[in-house]
Amino acid sequence: MFRFAHTEYLFLLLLIPLLIGVFIYTGILKRRNLNQFGNSDLLAQLMPNVSYVRPTVKFYMQLAVIILLIIVLAQPQFGTKVENVKRQGIEVMIALDVSNSMLAQDVQPSRLDKAKQVLSKLVDGMTNDKIGLVVFAGDAYTQLPITVDYVSAKMFLSSISTQLVPRQGTAIGSAIDLCIKSFGTKSEAGRAIIVITDGENHEDDAIGAAKLAAENDIAVHVIGMGKPDGAPIPVPGTMSFWKDKDGNVVVSKLNEEMCKSISSAGKGVYVRADNSNSAFRVINKELDSLAKSDIKTSVFSVYNEQFQSFTMLALLILIIDFFVFERKNKRLNKFKIFDLKDKITRN
């Protein structure tokens, strides 16, 4: 795979047509000025050492050197081969509730923002582990396939909002099923699913999905967002709250019983998130207890620098250019390299 490390330098190649244009224009002016003195054949006899071709040859040789140096500045590189790197780690899939109830602020700054803070700390603590992300409300979608690319994980995490899933609801079972499928083929590495939800408006068979995960040696941990007493749900961009069809403010409550049942069926733990870091510490401890195994990941190895060949070619052209004189050399006149071209140029 070929690439330039600094493609911005390639814009300097736009100067090449300009330099060629200037050279052609100056050549026209020189010939016009010479024609004012008389016949070109007669002038050639009066100036036997003048060459019409050599300056052109030297110009294009110097132009080639400039092009090669620009390429050197752009730092051409060739990638070597794809390698399988073995890492000792675990595999974790996150199922994050993005329903409107996650906007409630009984946990500061909100349930969803607190969940993103917990996940961000989990990602920061990972080194060789794989992580993936599923978002759900009334439906579940894969936001990030399982990967060791933590930069992408943090990027996707920061972009999460309640607008990602249009249909409202809490399809925890579908999210767990999608997480199970996201793991791919079975490996020796410890696996876990972390469900982050308030458990409200539960729709499908989440307990059955958690049991299926446990049967496949995948622990299902649940982080409950919110408080059992609940809180109203702010309407984004306004100062009001969501209301039911009768005009009453909707109060969203944490369904702890459902969250505990899911974690129990999945042979995991349940912890309620609060304004401290207790949820992060509990989940992180559970992940540390998982067996770590070799995780194969394909990575593209370091690019090899290729500027040396372009530099050597530029140097060679410069050396040749040094020995090409603009005027004819008596000692080299026996080599009729430029004579024919000179005659064609004059005519």
Image (cartoon, helix red, strand yellow):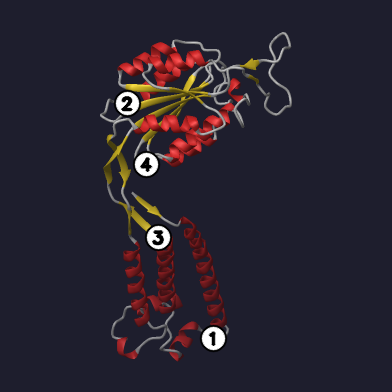
Q: Earlier in the sequence, mark 4 or mark 2?
A: 4
Q: Which residue is labeled 3 in the image?
A: 75
Residue identified by numbered label 2:
184
- Image-quadrant location for residue 213: top left
- Of badges 1 and 4, the one in the foreground is 4
Q: Amino acid at mark 1?
A: Gly
- Kindly indicate whether the residue at mark 4 contacts the one at mark 1 (C-beta within 8 angstroms): no
Question: From this viewpoint, is residue 145 visible?
Answer: no
Q: CA distance from mark 2 to mark 3?
A: 39 Å
Report the Cα–Cα distance between label 3 and label 1.
Answer: 51 Å
Q: Secondary structure at mark 4?
A: loop
> Mark 1 highlights which residue?
38
In the rendered image, which residue does mark 4 sit on?
127
Q: CA distance from mark 1 to mark 4?
A: 82 Å
Closer mark to the observer between disc 4 and disc 2:
4
Q: Amino acid at mark 3?
A: Gln
Q: Nearer the viewer, mark 3 or mark 1?
A: 3
Where disc 1 sits, the SS reads: loop
If you read the primary sequence from the N terminus, does the residue marked by circle 3 or circle 1 appear first? Answer: 1
- Which numbered disc, 2 or 3, marks the residue that appears first in the sequence? 3
Give x and y (percent) for residue 335.
Answer: 29, 82
Q: Is residue 87 above or below residue 31?
A: above
Could you tell me how far apart the alpha carbons at marks 4 and 2 are, in whole angstroms?
A: 21 Å
Which residue type carries mark 4?
Answer: Thr
